Amino acid sequence: MNIRAALSQVNDAAVKQPEGVVYAPIQMEGVLEAGALKEAAPYLRKKDYGEVVLVVDANTWEAAGSALAELLKQEGIAFGVCSLKPNGQGDVIADERTIVQVLLETPQRAKAVLAVGSGTIHDVVRFVCSQTGRDFISVPTAASVDGFTSVGAPIIVDGFKQTVPAIAPVAVFADLLVLAAAPQRLTAAGFADMLGKFTSLADWRFSHEMAEEPFCPLAYELTERALQQCVEAVDEIATGSQRGVEVLMEALLLSGWSMLLVGHSRPASGGEHHLSHHWEMAYIQEGRRQLLHGAKVGVASVMLAKRYREELGGAYPAIFGKLPEAEQLRAWLQQAGGPADPAGIGLTEALIEDAMKEAYKLRDRYTGLKHLVLKG
């Protein structure tokens, strides 16, 4: 997929259906194809950045960083490597310490920073680039999240997770050979992140109806289309094949562009993300190893879909009554190879109960989750 050409269709649709659109036209280059890593060096040469920095961790260096570094050497492009350090639990997280490491290891002469990795690395790089005026370039190593092309950066500050405005990448080089080689649990997490759109889209429609929050029909339709493409391709996604990860990565990119169109994460993030963030912060405070973002979102979406259908579906059938059955969501998650139940991500009943009552406070958004708490 040529990203500029795909975006041209999105931008054309935004011109025809401008309601709620704030950031069109979206400008982004790059490719999603086998061998996409080889396209990065010529692009950097064309942009004449002078010097760039690759931000990696130990795993993503092996997955793509080393090969990309060799390609840059062959092109004679100057670069540095910032290898992110894990915390005491062995996790690389998007917190103050990691951000400072990237700032310190990015020389002033570097005009662009390449995020070689998945969600956490992208969040750190997009934030650093937004604060320092550098171009941000995306090199995904797994189809594991939908935030590659968005502007929001979920950052943990003093143990509290908050999403701050940052910047989108100027280019994305998503190599199908790299993505297909990623562990299936990462691909399953990306699929789970997409399944979470069932509840996030319902929450968005609900907030528009109940609280008159801004709504963009185009962003809704694009996200819904990306979601359906994933569901239809679950058999291939479950195998981790090149075709499977291609469909999934296209959907993740499209979800990110939908967020760009409206300037926030509303199309792709609802109550299921609030639960996920609440659990993540609790795990940090308890000193536990972190879980994949998508894995948490998938489990949260199963739990919320069940509550929404049972407790809100009767009153709001057009919104919550049409959600898939929890058993269907669970079956899709299991087929893809990811966790589908609270036990699969180590949740206790106490933590679930606390999140159901408190997680809605993380964002000032009206969701079905917030409605359930407020109505008692």
Image (cartoon, grey):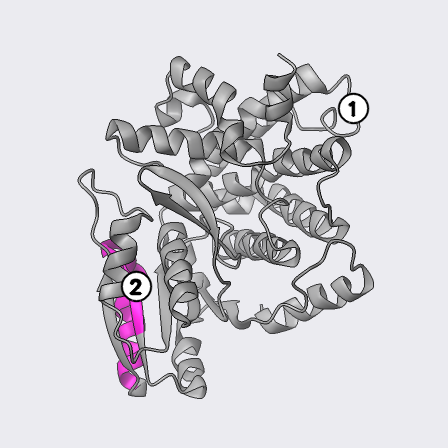
Residue 216 position (above or below residue 305): below
Name the outermost residue toward the right: 16
Q: Where residue 348 appears, x then y in whole percent? A: 37, 17
Q: Nearer the viewer, residue 70 or 28?
A: 28
Residue 55 numbered tag: 2
Dominant secondary structure of the magenta stretch? helix
Q: Secondary structure at mark 1?
A: loop
Q: Is residue 233 visible?
A: yes
Left or right of 115: which side holds 316? right
Q: Is residue 62 visible?
A: no
Q: Nearer the viewer, residue 134 or 81?
A: 134
Q: Residue placed at 34% from the left, 43% from the top?
A: 157
Name the outermost residue toward the left: 88
Bounds of the magenta segment = 53-74
Q: Where residue 302 appears, x then y in whole percent? A: 55, 26
Instruction: Give the class, few, some or many, for how many residues have Cα within 10 Å of label 1's Cα (few <14, many ≥20).
Output: few
Which kind of residue does numbered mark 1 sit on?
Answer: Pro
Q: In the picture, which quadrant includes the C terminus?
A: top right
Residue 317 numbered tag: 1
Which kind of residue does numbered mark 2 sit on?
Answer: Val
Residue 152 numbered tag: none
Q: Where residue 188 appears, x then y in whole percent? A: 45, 41
Q: In the picture, which quadrant includes the N terminus?
A: bottom right
